[in-house]
Amino acid sequence: MKKVQKTQPQKVKPRPKLPPNYIPPNTGARELFNKWTSRDAKFVMRQDGHYYSVVEIPCKCHGTEKLAWLHIAKGEYTLFNVAVGESMTFLSNNATVTTNWTNLQRPSKNTYSDQEFLIQSITMQEAGLRVRYDAAEIDKIGGLGEAKSVLTGQAWLWEPCQ
């Protein structure tokens, strides 16, 4: 009986199915290096630096007051598309981008048109939290004072030290 068990081939575990947009590690860098090599021009690195950017990622809150979580909807969230001084919105409220949110300083949208960035690593951290409740429901509550701007998404519920 033991010999039979040993001679039977072990079942191969199925590989996890990768998402259709999956890019294997280092593929992007390899493609970029090949592009630079085909130009037959000298590669110039202007700066090895750290860049940070701001993007709004709307979430839906689910759960109860004891156990809650945020659901990030499927979609595309574009980074490095706004510079200091430009306008953007948070929960449909207008805001002006500051150096607290990005260090991308460009006087025009064409500043980096002939440059390519090789991003070696990406980290993500929430830098602030806004909530937006239904304005009609908020208006029913009296005496909110400054809290009203927080509950309607016009002010930060939490943000980093500035």
Image (tube, rainbow, N blue to C red):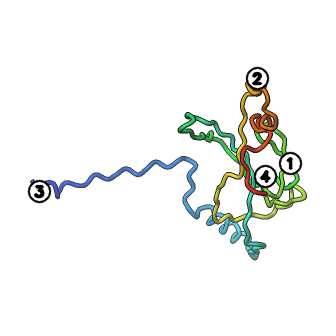
Cα distance between the residues tagged 2 and 3 = 75 Å
Query: Within 10 Å of the Cα at label 1, are there few (<14), some (14-19), or many (20+) other Cα atoms?
Result: few
* Residue 50 x, y percent position in the rendering: 72, 66
Whether label 4 touches label 3, CB < 8 Å: no
On the image, the x and y values in percent for residue 85 come to 88, 53
Residue at point 64% right, 59% down? 123
> Pointer 2: residues within 10 angstroms few (<14), some, or many (20+)?
few
State which tag comes first along the sequence, 3 or 1: 3
The residue pinned by badge 4 equals: 81
Pointers 2 and 1 in contact (C-beta within 8 Å): no
Residue lying farthest front?
143
Q: Which residue corresponds to mark 3?
A: 2
The quarter holding residue 68 reads top right
Look at the numbered disc 3 and give the secondary structure of its residue. Answer: helix
**Residue annotated with mark 2:** 140
Which residue position holds label 1?
96
| Whole-number angstrom distance, CA of label 4 to CA of label 3 | 64 Å
Which of discs 4 and 1 lies nearer the camera? The answer is 1
Residue 133 in percent (x, y) is at 72, 31
The amino acid at mark 4 is Asn
